[in-house]
Image (tube, rainbow, N blue to C red):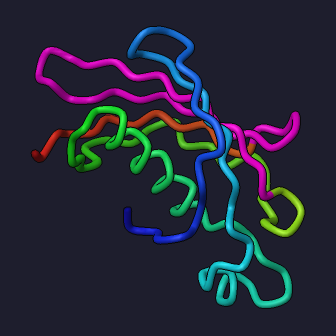
């Protein structure tokens, strides 16, 4: 995990056997990353939102992954960790004929969609 102590998985739910999952995570609003992004008005960096997805998919697939292709990345709402530290992620996973991991993910707080993402990861171990 690149972002140590950045978030905690509060709940994991398997929606469809080994292909679809839901996660409730708690963002550590005191993490040092928010001191620089931005002091007095913290905002979740988009790259951190994407890293959370990668961390979770690596855990689900028990593999080290490398981002091969990323498309349809839509940051739709700002996440202020002081106000919206409880996030809900839905992750759908498929494997293609090359063994690559195809992921569709959405991140929400309350009823607001903050991120939609489609990414292909290559297994590196």
Residue 91, placed above or below residue 116 = above
Q: Position of residue 31 (x, y in %)?
A: 64, 79
- Image quadrant where one finds the N terminus: bottom left
Residue 40, placed above or below residue 57 = below
Q: Who is closer to the viewer here, 34 or 22?
A: 22
Find the magenta span and give its range: 85-113
Left-right relation of 53 to 75: left
Left-right relation of 101 to 114: left
- Image quadrant where one finds the C terminus: top left
Left-right relation of 70 to 76: left
Residue at 84 percent across and 81 percent down: it is 41
**Residue sitting at the far top:** 16
Q: Position of residue 108 (x, y in %)?
A: 75, 39
Q: Position of residue 21 (x, y in %)?
A: 53, 24
Left-right relation of 38 to 106: right
Residue 49, placed above or below residue 113 = below
Residue at 72 percent across and 79 percent down: it is 30
Residue at 57 percent across and 67 percent down: it is 6
**Which picture quadrant has residue 84?**
bottom right
Q: Position of residue 92 (x, y in %)?
A: 48, 22
């Amino acid at each position: 995990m690149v972002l140590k102590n950045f978030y905690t998985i509060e709940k994991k739910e398997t929606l469809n056997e080994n292909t679809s999952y839901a996660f409730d995570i708690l963002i550590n609003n005191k993490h040092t990353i928010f001191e620089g992004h931005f002091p007095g008005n913290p905002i979740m960096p988009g790259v951190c939102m994407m890293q959370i997805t990668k961390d979770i998919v690596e855990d689900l697939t028990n593999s080290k992954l490398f981002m091969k292709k990323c498309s349809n990345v839509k940051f739709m709402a700002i996440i202020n960790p002081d106000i919206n530290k409880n996030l809900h992620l839905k992750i759908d996973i498929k494997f293609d004929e090359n063994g690559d991991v195809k992921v569709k993910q959405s991140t929400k707080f309350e009823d607001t969609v903050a991120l939609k993402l489609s990414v292909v990861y290559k297994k590196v171990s």
